[in-house]
Image (spheres, rainbow, N blue to C red):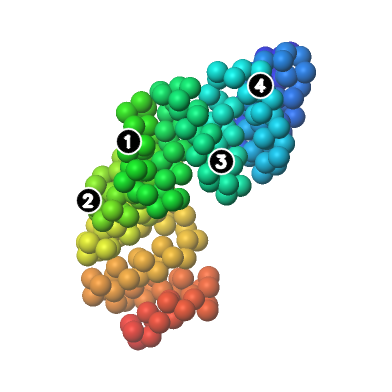
Amino acid sequence: MYEDFIMEAEAHYVNGQYKEALHYFEKAYALKQDNDSLNYIGCCHLGLSDYHSAIDVFRKLEEISPDWERPIFNLGRVFMKMGKYPKALDYLKRALALNPESQDSLYYLGVYYCKMKQYEVALEYYQKSLSIDYQQSETHLNLGMCFIQLSKDEEAIEEFELAYSMDMTCTEALYDKGLTLIRLGKYQKALECLLLFIDQRPTEEEAMLDIAHCFYNLDDWETSKTWVTRLLDLQPQHDLGNRLLKRIS
C-alpha cells in the first residue's frame, strides 16, 4: 500500500500536479513516517506556493535530520521564492556546507547570484554544478544567459545549443540562441532557430516579430510583411508590429 501511494504521488509530482501529489504523499507518510515522503510534502507545498506550510515541514524535517542538506536547501528555495534573498543565501550556503557535492545547492546559488546581477559569481556556481552533472539543460540555459550579461555571445550560443541538444522541449534555448544571433547580425542563422521555435510555440508574438525583423534585414520584405500580418492578426494593437508594417509599406 505504501509503495502504491508513493508511485502515484511521484507520477503526479513529475507532472507538476502538486495538489494530487500532496494527497498521496500524505497518505504514504501516514503509513510510514520517512524523511523522503516528508521532504516531498514540503516540496508540494512549495509547488502550490503555500510557503508557510512548506517552511513548517522543512523545519520539522531539519529537527529530525539536522545533518541532511535537503530540508536546508529547500528552505533556501522557499525564501528565494518569497524574495527573502539574504535568508535564501544563508540556507543555500548551509546546505552546501553539509554536502559540498550537492548539485542542486550549487545550481540555486547560481540562480541567487544571477538575481543579484553578480554574473561572474553565478557563472562559477553553474559551472561547479555542471561538473557534478553535465546533463542539465536548464543549467546550460542559465549559464548561457550569464554569458550574455557578460557580453560573451559565442560562449552563450554554445550553452544554448547544449541545452537544446539535451532537452528538445527546452525551446527557450532556441529562442535565446536566435536573439543572440540577431545581435551578431547573423539573420539567416537566427531564422533557423526562430522558425524551429515558432513551430513548437506557434502563438509567441515576440518571436513572430523577431522573425519579421530577420526577413526585413535580409531584404525579403514580402515575407517580413507576412509575419507581421500574422502577428497583428493575434494582436492588432502591437505597437512595434505596426511600426514595422509601416516601414515595409
Disc 3 element: helix
Q: Position of residue 191 (x, y in %)?
A: 30, 60
Label at residue 127: 1
Report the number of numbered marks.
4
For the C terminus, the image quarter is bottom left
Which residue is pictured at 28% across the width and 63% down the height?
A: 182
Three-letter code for the amino acid on which mark 2 is drawn:
Glu
What is the CA distance from the residue labelled 3 to the residue labelled 1? Answer: 23 Å
Quarter of the view holding residue 64: top right
Query: In the rendered structure, which amino acid carries the disc numbered 3?
Result: Lys
**Mark earlier in primary sequence (1, 4):** 4
Question: What's the residue type where badge 4 is placed?
Answer: Glu
Lower sequence index among marks 1 and 2: 1
Residue at image coords 53%, 70%: 234
Mark before the other along the chain sequence, 2 or 4: 4
Asked if residue 19 shows in the view, the reply is no
Task: Name the spot of residue 55 as percent of width and height, x first.
Answer: 67, 35
Q: Which residue is at the front of the view, 15 or 224?
A: 15
Q: Is residue 224 left or right of residue 109?
A: left
Neighbour class for label 1 at 10 Å: few (<14), some, many (≥20)?
some
CA–CA distance in space, label 3 to label 4: 18 Å
Pointer 3 with pointer 2, Cβ within 8 A: no
Q: Nearer the viewer, mark 3 or mark 1?
A: 3
Q: Nearer the viewer, residue 74 or 26?
A: 74
Q: In 3D space, how far apart are the residues under numbered discs 3 and 2 (Cα atoms)? A: 35 Å
Which label was assigned to residue 137?
none
Residue position for label 2: 154
